[in-house]
Image: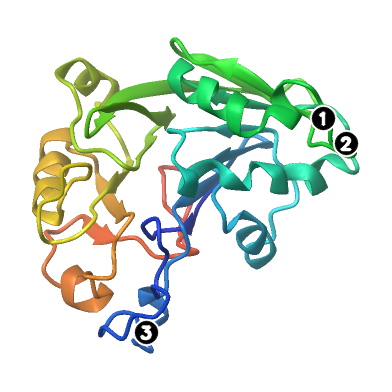
Amino acid sequence: MRIQLLGTGTSTGIPVVGCNCPTCTSGNPYDRRLRSSCFVEVNGVHILIDAGPDLRQQALLYGIRDIDAVLVTHHHFDHVVGLDDLRPFLFANRTPIPCYAMENSANVLRSMFGYIFRDGSYPGVARLTMNIVEGPFEVHSRTNNTRVRIVPIPAMHGSLPVLGYRIGGFAYLTDVSEIPYGSRSLLEDLDVLVLDALRPNPHPMHFSIDQAVEEARLIGARETRFIHMAHGVRHDEVNAMLPDGMQLGYDGMRLAVRGWSSE
């Protein structure tokens, strides 16, 4: 089993274009953040959570060679615009790659990528299928009969309904400002929680760092890693202030779930 954070930054990425703040000019590699995304390999099934504008770079950096499914958290640009970059993953295996999203996001993606999901008008179009998430589902390998159970976690991103995802003892929730009470039971007994923590100051669409820490305490995962940080967050300074068992994530971080080790 392999879990890797491909990016841990907010929608602009870090450094922000034209910014001279201490984070954007930092020499610390942990202060450089591509747009947030995650890769999970379990039992030979390769799962991508979100496909942002840095997907090609992330795949090359971290040696991603296969993708069997894409789990979409929501339809904002920095989480989906890389869907067209899935084409190379279909060169050797023409079996379509399924994308999973809640209905509101699926409708937006059908409009954004009409040439993929509607008319197939573009030569060499990525062979993607859209699947509406309404409850737990199974993701299948495109090369064998292996399957993995996925549990969607309803949450809110401001006023926008979004999804987190749970795979075994691992849960991933980016771009959230509220986790409804009904979702709490879906997050019990976690080994690793990955959770949105945008910045120190409050924000209407995201957990602040303090809010994320409190949410993490309530959820009670054995380990929590925070993601989707803006350039107001310097890695070493903020990381040193976090409680035991909680850390800032960083690009390329591998996460430890029971039965396997971290790198």
Q: Helix, strand or loop at disc 1?
A: loop
Question: Horizontal and vertical percent for residue 68?
Answer: 70, 33
Question: Horizontal and vertical percent for residue 6?
Answer: 51, 57
Q: Amino acid at mark 3?
A: Asn
Question: Horizontal and vertical percent for residue 79?
Answer: 48, 44
- Residue at the far top: name it: 134
- C-alpha gap between disc 3 and disc 1: 40 Å
- C-alpha gap between disc 1 and disc 2: 8 Å
Name the residue tied to disc 3: 28
Name the residue tied to disc 2: 93
Number of the label disc, if any, that sits on residue 143: 1
* Viewer-side residue, 121 vs 73: 121
Q: How many marks?
A: 3
- CB under 8 Å between discs 1 and 2: yes
Residue placed at 83% from the left, 39% from the top?
90
- C-alpha gap between disc 3 and disc 2: 39 Å
Of badges 3 and 1, nearer the viewer stands: 3
- 254 displayed left or right of 44: left
Residue placed at 20% from the left, 15% from the top?
182
Residue placed at 84% from the left, 36% from the top?
122
Among the two numbered marks 1 and 2 on one chain, the one whose residue lies closer to the N terminus: 2
Q: Give the vertical position of 28 relative to 92 (above or below).
A: below
- 260 displayed left or right of 221: right
Among the two numbered marks 3 and 2 on one chain, the one whose residue lies closer to the N terminus: 3
